Image (spheres, rainbow, N blue to C red):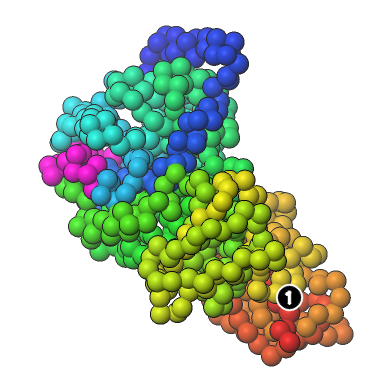
Amino acid sequence: MKTRTTISWAAGLFLAASSVSTTANGGWDMLKAKPEVVEAWKDMRFGMFICWGPVSLTGLEIGWSRGVPTWGMRDGVRGGKGPTPAEVYDGLYKKWRPDKFNAREWVKIAQETGARYLVFLIKHHDGFSLFDTKLSDYKSTGPESAWKVDVMKEISDACHESGMKLIVYYSQPDWHHPDFCGEHHERYIAYLHGQIRELLTNYGRIDGLWFDGLGGSAKQWDAENLFKMARSIQPHLIINNRCGIPGDYVTPEQYVGRCQFDQPWESCITLGTQWSWKPDDKLKPYTDGIQMLVACAVGDGNLALNTNPMPDGRIEPRQVESFRKIGDWLRKHGESIYGTRGGPFVAPDMGRRRFGHDRTRFQMPGGGWWGGSTHKDNAIYLHILRWPADTITLPPIKPRIVKHAVLTGGEATVKQTDAGIEVSVPATQRDAIDTIVKLELDAPAKSIPALKSKNTVAPSLTTGKKAIASNWFRKMDTYSPDKAVDGDPDTRWGCDYGTHSCWLEVDLGGAMTFDRAAISEPYGRVKEFELQVKVGDQWKTFHRGTTISEDLEVKFAPVTGRHVRLNLLKAGEGPSIWEFHLFARME
């Protein structure tokens, strides 16, 4: 098998990319999409992510299940630790015959799902190309391929025929290419740029590039020239943030992103527990898919929900059924999702939304979080995913509510005063998935700034307080103790590998009385812990537990003290705590 790269041709490629001047493009540096492109992408809100390849024969995860290659491990290469020997993994395409593959059927399913765009994986970290690249024989059309089908052509043709927007996933890391992170990495850069040029030249309109650089730097991919070359061919491209430069949107993976009105974002999440097909995988309920989509939309983000076709080329019937049920819901309530923007009402605790460690359920936060809102034209859509109380209390707004309706059925009571807005729906009329209350205003909703609704839950006593710890990873600020009490669910206190017990201590700034704690530890490494308060010179234990999980909430008899410890007694390698909160006793 060969990987072909011509250096003279590559040099010409770089000259072509470098020659795209800012002046020639009216001052546009081509590193960011034009605003209208981003807004059109946000309008779509929902996409289907498709991850597929010869690895489906094993039922294991794509790329990561591949073992050590013949040349051994290299600095900068994170793969090579999987259970399938590299020579076996790399030969799977020689016996992969997905004869039931039908790109038009895939696109039809995506349309029935309500997806407005596809994110199609064309090459993962394993280096196998699902298109007819002229730069390598390790491809679906290669001379040793058992199938010999240009999958990209089939997918792009089906998308173009149906009007489905197409975004191409392409992994810059390539654990199969002999030059990747080797002595001649510059040859690999030429190969990478060459493949992107092929994709953008040979398959008609491509709407975006979804890179996956595993944290690699812009220099490692020659990213600026890559972006300029790509947009010199297709100027309308939207490109994500995984190429070492900011790109057009950020991509939280396997969790719903936080509410961000100044930064476009898209959560990419699997319906099952892994990206590529897994036999008898545990799927999230379709209701979780709907609630994840809603949680993205109210936070002003998109959702790309992954399906993973089977070895024979069909999308698993169980997954088709779930996706179609999401589509049924969108056909009824899509006006509250498509073409909307998040806000203006932002629910309390908007950032506390993550999955359980097993990726099998969408876990909504507790406390005062009720969901959120979207808006379009003169309408605000309240998406009430849970009811922390019988009445949702919202901040006051200047526009007047002239009409309201419960789109999911039933009647709402809406009271607007100068002090705020109160919304209630009888318990028997609330929708189990999402109660949608539409508020029609006498002015455009976009004129209202983002507003946090009243938090009915006491604030955390630990947020922003001084924290110290017995250990943290390489003493890096990124994993320092204060990250566990910063109120940001995307940061964490992490410990060095080899650490199996440790403690986090928080100074509350004065004696406080509390009777509840919330702890987030998604990795599932903690096996036993205790909470302690300092009494004199001694530490007194007031609660013991075992595993923690994403959003553990514990209650105990009221405790008073200034210094509190979370003591991790038994844990796997390098335990991490995302958040540690204490709450005052409610009188």
Residue range corresponding to the magenta coloring: 88-109
Residue at horizontal 66 percent and vertical 66 percent from the top: 417
Q: Amino acid at mark 1?
A: Arg
Left or right of 559: which side holds 147? Answer: left
Q: Quadrant of residue 60?
A: bottom left
**Residue 139 at what x, y percent from top left?**
26, 31
Q: Is residue 53 above or below residue 356?
A: above
**Residue 124 at what x, y percent from top left?**
37, 39
Q: Is residue 75 above or below residue 399?
A: above
The C terminus, quarter of image: bottom right
Q: Which residue is mark 1?
A: 565
Q: Is residue 584 above or below residue 106?
A: below
Q: Residues within 10 Å of mark 1 (few under 14, many from 20)?
A: many
For the residue pair 139 and 184, the one nearer the viewer reads as: 139
Q: Secondary structure at mark 1?
A: strand
Residue 107 lies in the magenta-colored region: yes
Residue at horizontal 70 percent and vertical 87 percent from the top: 542
Residue at horizontal 73 percent and vertical 79 percent from the top: 584
For the residue pair 263 and 272, the one nearer the viewer reads as: 263
Left or right of 312: which side holds 297? Answer: right
Q: Quadrant of residue 534?
A: bottom right
**Residue 460 at what x, y percent from top left?**
71, 71
The N terminus, quarter of image: top left
